[in-house]
Each structure stands twice: as C-alpha cells, then as structure tokens.
Image: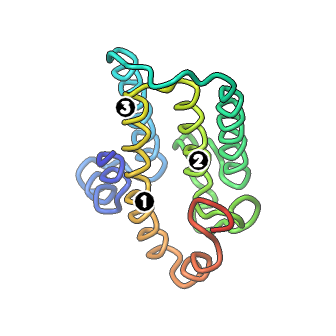
C-alpha cells in the first residue's frame, strides 16, 4: 500500500522522469502494470494462506452480491468522464487539466474508492475468513492515507477550484 502512495507521488514521478526518462502516459502505464502485478501477487498470497471461516453467510450472501454489483457499477460510472485507456497509461491524457465535478463525482470525490469499498465488503460477506477480514481492514485503514496524498496533489494542481469542490462534496460516502 505504501508502494502505491510512493509511486503516485509527484516526487517519484519527477525522479523517474529525470533519471529514467519515463513520463506522462508511459509512467502511468508502468505504474498501472506494477499495481496490477502487485494485486495479482497479493491475491495469490491470500488465496494460498490457510484461512479460518468466521461465519456462514447464509442468506446474507445476497447482500454480498448486491454490494459487489453496486461497487462494480460505481467504478464503471467513475470512468464515464475519465478515459480508462488514459487511466492505465495506454493513451496520452487529454483531460489532465480538467477537474471532473459532475456525474457521480458530484456526489463523491473518490468514487473509485467508494466502489472498491463496496466490492471489498461484499467479498468479505461472500468469503468471510480471517485473512480476508485482515486484508479488508488494512485497505480501509490505508484509504484515508491514500486520499490525503491524492488530495494534496489535486490541491496543488487545481488550487482553489479543488478546495471549493472539497468543501461541497464528501470524500467517499455520499451524504456524509
């Protein structure tokens, strides 16, 4: 998780740009590749760990499906105004200087995190084990830290416009 914040930092991007020559969408692609490989590796490690089932989800399995489905829909709509190809670095960013404040972004500032939380909680209900619980808790502890660093970059980039947006729109949960 700290690797995610380090690689996303402007200081790291500047260092890589200066010393390696990788910048813009090229850097974003390598960053995305490292993230995907890391997530696959983490998933494999979690899968291979001995796990103790904490409870039988029973009828709550339907709430797991609902949360996972809602999370996927939220993440999908998060990309309505953000290009997925640009997000992973396969296309040069055309919207880099635009602050997105409409659509789902008018309800929450970080809808990808909102969707991710719904997916994680749904997955825990679906597969309620000690290892999954610890993983979900660690991710939920990290998210505010990641949001803090991401918002520092957004304030630096968009200034007063982002500060005004931040005052009006909640970070992760709509209505709070």
Quarter of the rendering containing residue 105:
bottom right
Residue 128, given in percent of the width and then of the height, sits at: 49, 26
Q: Which mark is residue 144?
A: 1
Q: Residue at x 56, y 65 (%)?
A: 171
Does label 2 or label 1 sit earlier along the sequence? 2
Front: mark 3 or 2: 3
> Would you name the residue on which mark 3 appears?
38
Q: Residue at x 65, y 34 (%)?
A: 68
Image disc number at residue 113: none
Q: What is the distance, in whole Å, between disc 3 and disc 1 at their CAs?
A: 20 Å
Q: Image height check: is 160 above or below 90?
A: below
State which quadrant residue 67 falls in: top right
90 or 10: nearer the eye?
10
- Measure how far apart labels 2 and 1 are at the Cα level: 24 Å
User: At which x and y percent is residue 113?
Assistant: 55, 51
Labels 2, 1: front one: 1
Q: Residues within 10 Å of mark 1 (few under 14, many from 20)?
A: some
In terms of sequence position, does the residue under pointer 3 or pointer 2 come before the other? 3
Question: What kind of element bears circle 2?
Answer: helix
In percent of width and height, residue 37 lies at 39, 28
Tag shown at residue 86: 2
């Amino acid at each position: 998780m700290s690797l995610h914040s380090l690689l996303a930092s402007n200081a790291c991007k500047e260092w890589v740009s200066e010393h390696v020559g990788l910048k813009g969408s090229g850097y974003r692609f390598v960053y995305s590749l490292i993230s995907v490989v890391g997530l696959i590796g983490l998933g494999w490690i979690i899968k291979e760990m001995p796990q103790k089932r904490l409870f039988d989800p029973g009828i709550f399995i339907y709430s797991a499906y609902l949360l996972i489905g809602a999370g996927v829909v939220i993440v999908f709509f998060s990309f309505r105004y953000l290009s997925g190809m640009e997000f992973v670095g396969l296309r040069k960013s055309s919207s880099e200087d635009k602050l997105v404040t409409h659509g789902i972004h008018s309800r929450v500032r970080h809808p990808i995190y909102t969707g991710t939380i719904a997916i994680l909680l749904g997955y825990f209900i679906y597969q309620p084990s000690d290892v999954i619980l610890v993983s979900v808790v660690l991710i939920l502890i990290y998210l505010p830290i990641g949001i803090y660093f991401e918002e520092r970059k957004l304030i630096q980039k968009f200034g007063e416009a982002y500060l005004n947006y931040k005052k009006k729109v909640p970070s992760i949960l709509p209505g709070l």
